[in-house]
Image (spheres, rainbow, N blue to C red):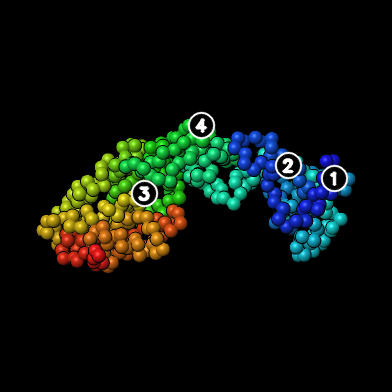
Amino acid sequence: MNVLGFRVFFRKMSTLKNFSLIPVGVRGMKVLDRMKFLRNIEIPLIKVSVENLSKIRQHCKQYFLKLDNFKPVQDFEDEKFKKCIYLNPETITQWGDISESVRDALFSNGIDENNYSTKVVQLTYENWRFDAIFKAVLPENEEIVSSFSQIGHIIHLNLREHLIEYRQLIGQVLVDKIKTCRTVVNKSNIIDNTYRNFSMEVIAGDEDYLVTVKENNCIFEFDFSKVYWNPRLCREHERILALLKPGDVLFDVFCGVGPFSIPAAKRKCTVYANDLNPDSFKWLNHNAKKNKIILSLFKSYNLDGKDFIYNIFKDYLIEYCNQNKQKGLKIHVTMNLPAMAVQFLKYFKGLIDDKQHLDKFDCEIIVYVYCFAVGDDPDSIARTMINDSIGCDMSKYIMDVFDVRNVSPKKEMMRVTIKLTKEVLFDTNIYEPPNKKLCVND
């Protein structure tokens, strides 16, 4: 087809409202072939002189053609008009598609329909964003790769079953298009071992799992294949850290590589950080040194959460009661292991069995425990999980229930904030377990 024929054909097609500015003829591609992304498209443009370019471009900015490696304002071969502004063909197919207010503004600057024209432009693989490529290649009417997590130079995907056969292409496109990406991994949604790390496959780029992440003014380095890190929790880390004041104490029961502990110690809190995963423990201490944490404010442990509560936390409270040097100490306890953390709450009930410490106990203890709530009422489900774990009605001690993030349909990650009082720690009251329905067999 010659250029003229293409122009006529395209003008007819461009009046269709469903015109989409994506590559064509690549549906179902599984091995990336960049040459097949060439596409000739007739692009609307406005011819302008150099003198009034700055004013015109401000009025047209909302209609700019925005593509990778493509400048919407370019040189134009014309005796009078040396510049042109390319417009988005998905929005503009004729002069009248420009809003009346913008046309009036253009007219006041000497621009009218005579300045409107079109030009056939060849777009290449370099011009398409990754989302346009995925929309053009991956199966229609199915979920595609619309979002992902990036940890340092690694992009982490959870590909659905129907996308597995496209994984090499997906990975290569992301390496090509995301400048800060050198490695793409596909990981299972399921944490299938004690240490909370995932099985993963490198689908593109370098097999390099050592990453560097900056969060809350701290630098974290770790091996992403051996520890747990979720960039979607950055905002939640900020929320909790905002509640900590210099002089407070933090017990981080499942600390990972330190997203709560390291910034807290930097803010002059005394921190007791624990994780069962030896690799998390290794990188936790590495990050403490990396961020120049004052060692007198930071102690780390490689224990099971139960042992950490029964020994380190309990011993601290007993020593505090015996010394009674500081009045009204505020202690924060973070329990960020949403799949299991609630199960560890029962270890706080009756933790201190020596009642001689009861009268000396005057510190305020706030526990932030995370859980997954599956169902239509995550708030109620989270509260019930707390009561069932401790074995009594904790309603009066629950300060807040917060929805941290959506994990999947009808599955929310919740944070329950509990006030851990002397009544719970010393088990001074006789509690009745929550009411349960009587099951009668036929």
Residue drawn at 37 percent across, 63 percent down = 379
Marks 4 and 1, how far apart at CA: 46 Å
Q: Earlier in the sequence, mark 4 or mark 1?
A: 1
Q: The residue tagged with tag 1: helix, strand or loop?
A: helix
Sort mark 2 into few (<14), some (14-19) or many (20+) by Cα contacts within 10 Å: some
Task: Tell us which disc is closer to us: 2 or 3.
Answer: 2
Q: Quadrant of residue 398?
A: bottom left
Q: What residue type is labelled 2?
A: Arg
In the image, taking residue 172 as reference, residue 158 lies left or right, namely: left
Q: The residue tagged with tag 4: helix, strand or loop?
A: loop
In the picture, the quarter occupied by the C terminus is bottom left
Q: Residue furthest right?
A: 79
Q: Which amino acid does label 4 sit on?
A: Asp
Q: Name the residue under label 3.
A: 260
Q: Earlier in the sequence, mark 4 or mark 3?
A: 4
Q: Which of 136 and 293 is in front in this view?
A: 136
Q: Residue 241 carries which label?
A: none
Tag 1 and tag 2, C-beta contact below 8 Å: no
Q: Name the residue under label 2.
A: 39
Q: Which amino acid does label 1 sit on?
A: Gly
In the image, taking residue 12 as reference, residue 397 lies left or right, namely: left
Marks 2 and 4, how far apart at CA: 31 Å
Q: Mark 4 points at which residue?
A: 206
